[in-house]
């Protein structure tokens, strides 16, 4: 048993992190106090830390992207299984988010939505559709919406 110097409560040795520089080899503050201090510090200096994080991500964008890509490639089977299990356990939430995504694509007339419209009942693949045709279809849909609104 050891007493935390922050909260002054006696706790099990497992409640303290390791620190080689201390006589007993353990941190002076318990893990719970260290976590709370970290949260407080993060909240107090939120803007500065967010700015640092944003700058880091911007400077290391390619490296981060490569690392994530390698991780995904290495663990694809596990990630797919986790996603499948989550979908099965949260079917209502998944279906609702799918409806929202679909509605957003329909309302915003995204390229993927228009390509889907153009490839329905045809043998054309989405990669074969030129961007100019997508833009024309977007204009046609917008005009039809305006006509429906005025009627």
Image (cartoon, rainbow, N blue to C red):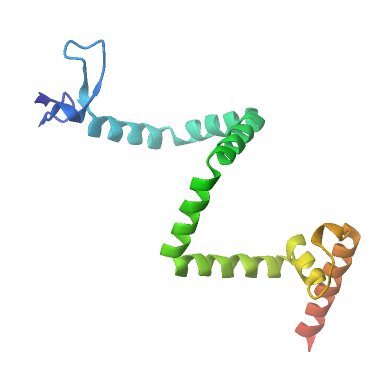
Split into 4 quadrants, where in the image is the C terminus?
bottom right
In this rendering, is residue 18 above or below 131? Answer: above
Q: Quadrant of residue 45?
A: top left
Q: Residue at x 74, y 61 (%)?
A: 112
Q: Quadrant of residue 10?
A: top left
Q: Residue furthest front?
A: 77
- Front residue of 148/11: it is 11
Q: Residue at x 80, y 61 (%)?
A: 126
Q: Quadrant of residue 15?
A: top left
Residue 58 horizontal/vertical position (percent): 63, 32
Does residue 7 appear left or right of residue 53 in this picture?
A: left
- Front residue of 134/123: it is 123
Q: Residue at x 51, y 35 (%)?
A: 50
In this rendering, is residue 85 above or below 29? Answer: below
Split into 4 quadrants, where in the image is the N terminus?
top left
Residue 36 horizontal/vertical position (percent): 28, 35
Residue 119 horizontal/vertical position (percent): 80, 69
- Front residue of 78/103: it is 78
Does residue 134 appear left or right of residue 53 in this picture?
A: right
Does residue 80 appear left or right of residue 13 in this picture?
A: right
């Amino acid at each position: 048993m050891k007493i935390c110097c922050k909260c002054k409560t006696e706790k099990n040795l497992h409640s303290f992190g390791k620190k080689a520089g201390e006589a007993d080899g353990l941190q002076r503050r318990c893990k719970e106090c260290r976590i709370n201090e970290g949260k407080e510090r993060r909240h107090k200096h939120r803007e500065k830390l967010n700015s640092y994080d944003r700058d880091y991500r911007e400077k290391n964008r390619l490296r981060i992207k490569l690392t994530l890509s390698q991780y995904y490639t290495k663990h694809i089977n596990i990630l797919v299984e986790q996603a499948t299990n989550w979908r099965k356990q949260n079917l209502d939430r998944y279906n609702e988010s799918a409806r929202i995504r679909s509605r957003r694509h329909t309302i915003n007339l995204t390229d993927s939505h228009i390509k889907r419209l153009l490839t329905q009942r045809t043998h054309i693949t989405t990669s074969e559709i030129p961007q100019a045709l997508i833009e024309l279809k977007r204009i046609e849909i917008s005009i039809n919406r305006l006509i429906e609104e005025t009627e």
